[in-house]
Image: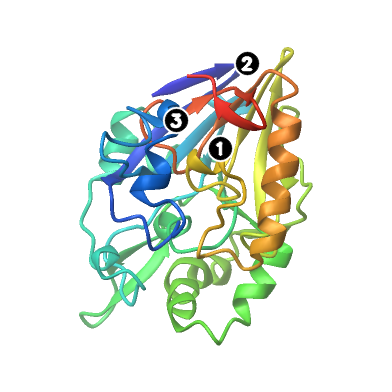
Amino acid sequence: MKWRIGDVTVTKIVEMEVTGGSRFILPQATYEEVLPIKWLQPHFADERGRLKMSIHALVIEAPGGGKNGQRIVVDTCLGNDKQSRRIPTWNNLNLPFLADLEAAGFPRDSIDTVLCTHLHVDHVGWNTMLVDGTNGTKKWVPTFPKARYLMGRVEFAHWRQAHERPDMEAVFADSVKPVYDAGMVDLVETDHRITNEIGLIPTVGHTPGHVSVLIRSKGEEALITGDFMHHPCQIAHPEWCSAADSDPMLGQQTRERMLEELSGRPVLVIGTHFAGATASRIVKDGNAYRMDI
């Protein structure tokens, strides 16, 4: 799936998609509450009211850089061979993500930049890959050998000290620290500009340093959400908070502010976990909002 915004192209590379089993992340999104939101079907929910969700990376191609322009991977999914994940089915994955990335025209050594909207488990996994080391051991190495990895300064500092979350300690150890130790990380502010067309905007609440990605080119705009919204049902119900939000009240305030702003102009909203169509404009729907699929 691919979208064009002026001179910028965004391509979706799926690691996995699931239907149902999402109550752990959005507890208020019961089948009974989801079914009346008819516009969620068929892309974002099924006929029973089960949510459809996707874990995918988004590859931005922008002007500048080498012969291929600038190639930026936004969020790197779960990754293979990882351990100590809070969700057991996310351990020891063996998925063809890198092969799919290359088949789409993006071999890993062609990537210039890796951008993490935040440092949760499903956004940093392919930052690293497991390779053979010395004496029969294995080691984690940066997956994208020619890339600079952009991480928020506030976000990085928070999770570096998050000793109350053993699962996040494991994520930091195998998917963040090896890249940092290799000298490949640039710690940036929440309003950092990457290229003339691409910049970050702060959308905090889900995590302390969470950002979204704003693309502007030739009078067109797009926004890659990150996790200030996990699922389009939160467009209809911005008060539905994720169980993973570090500050649920602030997360709700961010959603309400962003939905008001986005519905006021023609912005293509590309959801980081939105399945199916994944992207569209957001428009007013009575006292709420919906995606204009």
**Going by the image, does 234 lie left or right of 221?**
left
Q: Nearer the viewer, residue 197 or 271?
A: 271
Q: Disc 2 marks which residue?
A: 7
Quick check: 30 above or below 198?
A: below
Mark 2: secondary structure: loop
Q: Nearer the viewer, residue 43 or 223?
A: 43
* Disc on res. 236: 1
Q: Amino acid at mark 1?
A: Ala
Kindly report which numbered mark, 3 or 1, lies closer to the viewer in this rendering: 1
Q: Quadrant of residue 256?
A: top right
| x 61%, y 59%: residue | 206
Q: CA distance from mark 3 to mark 1?
A: 16 Å
Quick check: 248 above or below 103?
A: below
Q: Amino acid at mark 3?
A: Thr
Q: Nearer the viewer, residue 61 or 285?
A: 285
Q: CA distance from mark 2 to mark 3?
A: 20 Å
**Going by the image, does 283 lie left or right of 137?**
right
Q: Residues within 10 Å of mark 3 (few under 14, many from 20)?
A: many
**Residue 194 seen in the figure:** no
| x 72%, y 59%: residue | 250
* Disc on res. 278: 3
Q: Position of residue 244 (x, y in %)?
A: 52, 65
| x 38%, y 69%: residue | 140
**Going by the image, does 4 lie left or right of 190?**
left
